[in-house]
Image (cartoon, rainbow, N blue to C red):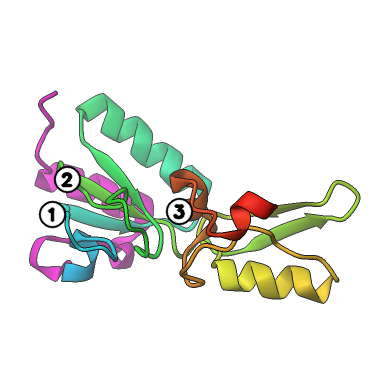
Amino acid sequence: MKYKKITNEDLLYFKNIFGEERVISENEIKSEYAHDELGTVFNYPEVLVKATHKKEISALMKYANLHKIPVTVRGSGTGLVGACVPIYGGVLLDLTLMNKIIELDKTNLTLTVEPGVLIMDIYEYVLKEDLFYGPDPGEKSATIGGTVSTNAGGMRAVKY
């Protein structure tokens, strides 16, 4: 598939959705956003946007789909599979600001969280409730969204 390159018109649209301070483009994008922790796959996005709400993501995805702009989702970038590397350029959607724990349902033993919540914060939160989070990916600063999307469970995944 041939993807569209980001234009000034696109940047203006993104800034309207996310605000000027959460849209970073071209030379302002740090190298850490061009790879994951393994470092074998490397490519810069054309623009980095930092979401704080699902409505922003919905507006971005609708626009990107309409204009054939690739979008790659990123958490804290601790993965080892290249999933957060924007290999087609386009938009890198950073979800680390979406880091709220919304609800613990003790009856059903479920935790509702935003995708940018860190694994270490989940461990700490459930421990206070005398509960235990079974998966144990190697990097505790990984986000829950990233671990779910890459099926990263660590060694305890087999046991639990």
User: As shown in the figure, which amino acid type bears the numbered disc 3?
Assistant: Gly
Image position, residue 153 (x, y; %):
54, 54
Is residue 153 or residue 103 the one in the foreground?
A: 153
Q: How many marks do you count on the picture?
A: 3
Q: Describe residue 116's horizontal placement relative to residue 37 as left or right.
A: right
Marks 1 and 3, how far apart at CA? 19 Å
Q: Tell me which amino acid carries mark 2.
A: Ile
Q: Position of residue 137 (x, y in %)?
A: 51, 62
Q: Are marks 1 and 3 in contact (CB under 8 Å)?
A: no
- Residue at left 62%, top 72%? 121
Task: Magenta stretch: give its range.
Answer: 1-30
The residue closer to the viewer here, 116 or 26, is 116
Sequence order check, earlier mark of 1 and 3: 1
Circle 1: element type: loop
Residue 42 image offset from top left, x and y in percent: 14, 57
Residue at screen point 15% across, 41% down = 88
Q: Secondary structure at mark 2?
A: loop
Residue named by callout 2: 87
Q: Magenta segment: does it hold 7?
A: yes
Residue 151 pos. (x, y %): 49, 46
Instruction: Give yes or no for contact between labels 1 and 2 (Cβ–Cβ under 8 Å).
Output: yes
Say which of 44 and 119 sits in front.
119
Specify the quadrant of the image occupied by residue 74: bottom left
- Mark 2: give few (<14), some (14-19) or many (20+) Cα within 10 Å: some
How far, Cα to Cα, is label 1 from label 2? 5 Å
If you read the primary sequence from the N terminus, does the residue marked by circle 3 or circle 2 appear first? 2
Q: Label 1 is placed on what type of residue?
A: Asn
Res. 43 mark:
1
Asked if disc 3 and disc 2 are in contact, CB closer than 8 Å, the reply is no
Describe residue 89's horizontal placement relative to residue 37 as left or right. left
Which of the labelled discs sits on residue 146, or is there none?
3
Per the image, label 3 sits on a secondary structure element best described as helix
